[in-house]
Image (tube, coloured by chain):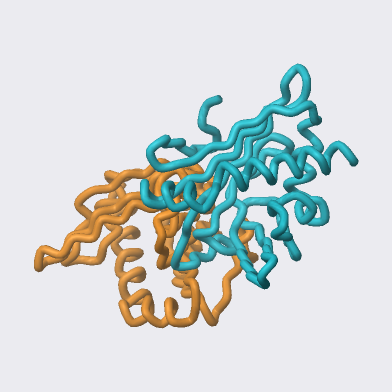
Chain colours: A orange, B cyan
Amino acid sequence: MTDAHATHFDPALDLELRREAAVPPRLVWRAWTEPELLMQWFTPAPWRTTACELDVRPGGKFRTVMEGPAGEKHDNAGCVLAVEPERFLLFTDALGPGFRPLGSGFMTASVTIEPTATGTLYVARAYHKDAAGKEQHEQMGFHQGWGAAWEQLVGLVGRL
Amino acid sequence: MTDAHATHFDPALDLELRREAAVPPRLVWRAWTEPELLMQWFTPAPWRTTACELDVRPGGKFRTVMEGPAGEKHDNAGCVLAVEPERFLLFTDALGPGFRPLGSGFMTASVTIEPTATGTLYVARAYHKDAAGKEQHEQMGFHQGWGAAWEQLVGLVGRL
């Protein structure tokens, strides 16, 4: 898989989750781009996604509210950067809706959905400023968290 | 002029320079997108632009090095966000090349070039995180600086 849309994956800085499943690419895309679906899988239990706004076009809002079992609440309003329907989605927390700078920024994330003979090859990547950002994200549980969310997505898609 | 490419101009947060000149839009575009041209007008004298790298596509590098008369040096490597050839350019310092977050971000900037009966309507906008960002940019001399740079651009384009 080559880097799409001018992203550049650097193993020293970035993280990747790669999975295959017997689910149709178009349903994976729907799960990522329809708020009422995304809210059902995006956050590994016992956390929940309690609100979501998606405007799936460059400059559009990518907002999720995640709530934890002890009352923690993370409200992130990021920005969609690139869209290739049913194939590729890119967004960042360094910009808000309308590409407005937020003065901070932890990651840009890409989701690539490729059809296979039996379903979908799914590649989710997180791009960081530096190696410390990668390490912090790893320690926050990137692989476990994004992996658990993917399992929830596959379960949801199987019920659609 | 409506907001293009999902940007949203907010007068409370953002700044705008608007000029008309009897120069062809395609030469204004060249002055913004060819490094050897941009270096000749981008920085109001006595500052100079001493290096420039432009990859004019979403995710591409937008790098300028500006040097001042007392040896000051500002090296900014931002990211192109949207391109409409000869009409619209959008870039930010919140992301680096490849959309990689930089952990900071002062502005996103747009340049809109519209043909008129006699030449070009030029609108340059700077989008900030908040009103404090706008105020800081105003006090740094946004109107004077971007205005002087535009005059340098018009002069350059007249010699092409």
Q: Nearer the viewer, residue A158 or A54?
A: A54
Question: Which quadrant would the C terminus of chain B be assigned to in this image?
Answer: top right
Any part of residue B76 in sight: yes
Which of A26/A88 is in front? A88
Left or right: residue A141 compared with residue B65 = left
- Quadrant occupied by the N terminus of chain B: top right
Query: Of B87 and B107, which appears nearest the observer?
Result: B107
Residue at left offset 48%, top offset 45%: B127
Instruction: Name the quadrant containing residue B99.
Output: bottom right
Instruction: Give x and y (percent) for residue A146.
Output: 35, 69
Question: In this image, B71 relative to B127: left or right?
Answer: right
Q: Is residue B101 above or below residue A138?
A: above
- Residue A32 vs residue B159, the one in the foreground: B159
Q: What residue lies at 48% left-to-right and 44% top-to-bottom? A: A59
Coordinates of residue A29 in the picture (x, y in percent): 43, 49
- So how many labels did they put on this image? 0
The residue positioned 47% from the left and 59% from the top of the image is B105
Above or below: residue B23 compared with residue A61: above
Q: Position of residue A10 (x, y in %)?
A: 57, 76
Residue at the left extreme, as displayed: A70
Q: Residue furthest top?
A: B117
**Farthest residue toward the right?**
B160
Question: Looking at the image, is A107 positioned above or below residue B56?
Answer: below
x and y, in percent, of residue A62 in the image: 38, 49
Q: Residue at x 68, y 61 (%)?
A: B64
Q: Is any part of residue A118 visible from this angle?
A: no
